[in-house]
Image: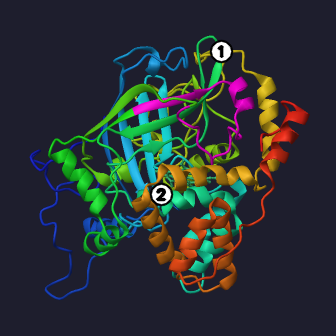
Amino acid sequence: MPSQQVFNGKDGAVYTTSNGAPVKEPYAAQKIGFNGPLLLQDFHHLDLLAHFDRERIPERVVHAKGAGAHGYFEVTHDISDLTCAALFNKVGNRARTTIRFSTVGGESGSADTARDPRGFAIKIRTEEGNLDWVFNNTPVFFIRDPAKFPHFIHTQKRDPQTHLKDADMFWDYLSQNPESVHQVMILFSDRGTPDGYHQMHGYSGHTLKFINAKGEWQYVQVHVRADKGFKTLTDEQAGKLQGTNPDYGIQSLFEAIEKGEYPSWTVYVQTMTAEQAEKFRYNVLDLTKVWPHAEYPLRPVGKIVLNENAQNYFAEIEQAAFSPSHLVPGIEASADPVLQSRLFSYPDTHRHRLGVNYQQLPVNAPVVPVANFQRDGFMAFNNQGPRPNYQSSILPLSYKAKAYEGTDERHETWIGNARLQLSEINELDFEQPRALYKKAMDQTARDHLISNLAGHLGGVKSPVVKARQLSVFAAVDQDFSDAVAKAIGHPSVKPLPAAPAEKLLRLKTNIGLVQTIQ
Ligand code: HEM
């Protein structure tokens, strides 16, 4: 890392106290006589214990277990028609990049091959500041209303009393919130158990906005596709590895890079104008839906290569602080409420996990100078010297932020009303899961999905929860639900009632553009 000291054992370093004084014997505590008590004057010993006592910082509340590495992002195609971000203004531009991959629900010591979505967090250090793309390895998510997130996460973690993971909690939430079914079906396919961290795709999931130099904007979805394809493990392989090598993902990433087998990805965007969004079958801000590739083709942008392992995991990966709100001019968040909520949540948790000056840590510090009026706080090691700490008329800071105009306010209004419908389930919610099951999956994939689901849902004790989740699957496809039911010895269940899509689509047409699609 820039400004990160490299200790490689060959630097002739002398063992010292934390204030840099040489120590003669690292393994000895000072004491009186042969068996006497220890001495308070022994700063080396006291400091050693005191520092050790404070070694642990809070682990991430989600995505606690992970692995990461450094490399670069290179622009391979001109997209200046889409965005004025300086990174994308020339083919061949390169930016130093760090990626952290993670599982979601488990603690920092949990197994890398657990059935879980994977985090795919990318920090691209551009000359206009750091651009973080905090993605997952799935194109959709469980929720589209951020108010549900903490409740949802609690049900995927441990029971407050037993401190055990609990299949009833897990399915109780999902069966009550059927908009999750698309992500649930991906999770219980073999994509839920990727082969390591570096052999999978990443997706923005959210709709972003790219703005060009003329102030014109488009909706964008970003896809980061592994050049060697998305490799998965079967449930059996993943389960075995949980016991034999819980750090399988960390190890395989580290070893691939050490061997020079650098993982690489091609970055694509899908784009949609505001006008197209109004005609789109789904709400463009609904995180549970994908944009069909046939209608919105993937357009190549660049590549990412990871070619450098961290010298120090804690400093360079654990302390890395990614946020969807770390954006650069020309790339903005859309009004997707889950994304809007995340813009707050990540810097908030970083201030708790790493401190108010987390952006000054070497792994997080932008490669360009930071100049603002933030001062002090714990660990302010770049406190901006004598520069004024207010907007001074004598020694002003110069402001150079890119300005663009022309955002289509009308569409923002349309977006505003979409929020009201977020928790309402309708027939459209089952179309894409149905296509996933009937068209995207082959018979083997379907068989794996059914047996993976049966393995988990079969452990639910509550008959209400079991039947309700089967009714969600029946809304996707009756045969699918019946196959899961048969595998867990349950009678067939009818689909849950959902509002008809036609009614909602008509509602949209009647009210015109100022209404949601759903
Ligand atoms: C990590 C909140 C949804 C991807 C985290 C963390 C929080 C959080 C608090 C821990 C960050 C840290 O301690 O460094 C939320 C909230 C969400 C949400 C409130 C919804 C309301 C999502 C979605 C995605 C996502 C939809 C992907 C599309 C990630 C990733 C990490 C993460 C990749 C790990 C970052 C790292 O490696 O440091 N999230 N999250 N999250 N989240 Fe989310």
Instruction: Identify which residue, 343 or 21, lies in the foreground.
Output: 343
Q: Is residue 20 left or right of residue 367?
A: left
The residue tagged with tag 2: helix, strand or loop? loop
Q: Is residue 145 left or right of residue 166?
A: right
Label 2: how many Cα within 10 Å (few below 14, some 14–19, many 20+): many
CB atoms at circles 1 and 2 under 8 Å apart?
A: no
The residue tagged with tag 1: helix, strand or loop? loop
| Image vertical order of residue 51 relative to residue 224, above or below | below
Q: Residue placed at 44% from the left, 68% from the top?
A: 107
Q: Residue placed at 73% from the left, 30% from the top?
A: 279
The disc at residue 117 is: 2
Q: Is residue 54 left or right of residue 264?
A: right
Q: Quadrant where the C terminus lies?
A: top right
Using the rendered image of the protein, determine whether residue 311 is visible from the camera's viewpoint: yes
Which residue corresponds to mark 1? 215
Q: Residue placed at 56% from the left, 30% from the top?
A: 296
Residue closest to the far right: 510
